[in-house]
Image (tube, grey):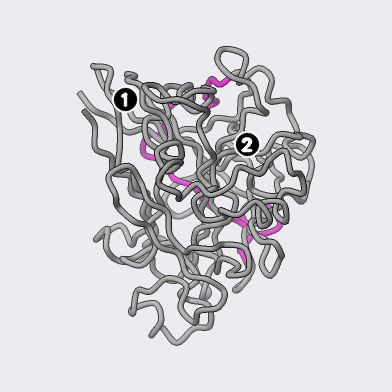
Amino acid sequence: MAEIRFQLLQQPAGTPTRDNLGGSGLAFYGSSVGSSVQIGEYQGNSYVANSTGSAYSDQCFNVKYVAGSFPSGQTVLSGQHGATDNIGLSGIKTFQSTIGIEFGHSTAVKVQNCQMRIYDRSNINNPASGVNTKAAEIVNHNGYVGSTAWANQGSVGVTSTAIGSGDAVWWGEPWPAALCTQNYWTNSSSVKFYNGLDSETNTNGDSRLASAGIAGSYDTVGGTGIIMPLLDSPGSGQYELQKAVVTGSTGMIWPKWTQYIKTTGNQATFFGSSANNFGDGSDAGNLGKTYGGTGVHTHHTWSVALSASPLSIGSKEQYGLYISVEYL
C-alpha cells in the first residue's frame, strides 16, 4: 500500500539512476573514495555503500557544506557533477542532490507534515553518534514547469540564473541572524521546525548534544532539537512544485526559504537580484503558498542534500536517516 524508497536521481530527464537503494546505505569519504574524513572536516566524496563503508558502488553527487561562509548556505558541488563548483544551495538542481526520497502508494494521495530525522538507528529521538550532519531540501528546475522542467535543468547548477525554491541555508548550521529574521519554518499542519541562529550558543537545542563536551557537537540535524521539514505533496518527479499556480488558490508557489529569509533586502543579499525577491513568506496572506504542492499523486519525490563531519576517529555506524509523512 504505502512505501518509502531512497534513490539516486542524477538524471536530467528525472528518471532515477537507481530506483531503490534497498539494503544499501550512503558512505561519506574524505578526499578519495575509501579514505577517512578528517575530524572537523566535511566529506569530499559520497557513495552508495554497505553498512560499514568497506564496499561501495554508485557515486553520488557530493554536496559539501562550507563552514564560516556569508551569507551562508554555501556548498561545494562535485562527484557525479564532473567538476567542482562553489555554489549556494538554491543554485543546485533537483537531480544534483545527495539522495532522492520517494513515497509511493497504490492510490493517488496527498502528503503533509513530512519530516526528516537524523538518528542513531535505535530511537528516532536520539541524535546520531559521533557525527554532525547538515541537510537541505533541494528544489530547482531552472524556472521551467510541467513536462519540460527536468529536460531543461541543464548539467551545471552554477550556470542557472533561476533561484531554487527549496532551502537556501543548511539545517544544522547556525543561521545568520543578520539575514534570517526568524529561526523556524512552519508547515501546513502548523508544526514549527526550529534551527539555531549564529547569535545563539546551541544551534540544536538537544541538551544531550550541548553536554557532549565537543566543540560544535550541537551544530547538527538530529535528536529532538532539529528535525528538517520537507514540502507537502511534491508529486512524482516534483511535478507539483514546478507549477506556477497553487492548486485551489491564486498566485504562484513561493519558495520554502521565504519563511525565514523574509525581507526583500535580505533576499537581495542572498541572491543579488531584485527579480528574485518575494517578500515575507511567513505573512498570513502568503504562508499558504510556501507549504509546497497540493495535488494527489501515487508517487511523491523529495531531493535532499547531506553533508557529514565526524566528531571522533572511527567509522560512524550509529547513523541513520528516518522519514515520516501523513497521507490522505
Q: Where is residue 1 in the image (x, y as percent from the top left)?
A: 20, 23
- Tell me: 61 left or right of 272: left
Q: Does label 2 or label 1 sit earlier along the sequence?
A: 2
Residue 245 is left or right of residue 123, and the answer is: right
What residue do we see at 32% from left, 19% from top? Answer: 298
Q: How many marks?
A: 2
Identified by mark 2, the residue type is Gln
Assess whether mark 1 and mark 2 are in contact (beta carbons under 8 angstroms): no
| Classed neighbour count for the residue bearing mark 2: other residues with Cα under 10 Å, few (<14), some (14–19), many (≥20) | many
What residue is at 33 percent from the left and 62 percent from the top?
120
- Reply yes or no: does residue 165 show up in magenta: no
Using the image, tell me which numbered label, if any, was put on residue 192: none
Quarter of the view holding residue 92? top right
> Which residue matches tag 1?
104
Is 23 included in the stretch rendered in magenta? yes
Q: Which of the 4 image quarters holds residue 206?
A: bottom left
> Where does the magenta region start and end?
14-37
The one nearer the camera, 321 or 302, is 302
Q: Eyeballing the image, is 313 above or below 183?
A: below
* Residue 199 percent coordinates (x, y): 55, 78
Instruction: Tell me what residue is drawn at x 78 percent, y 46 percent.
Output: 84
Position above or below: 55 against 40 = above
Q: Magenta region's main secondary structure?
A: loop
Residue behind mark 2: 96
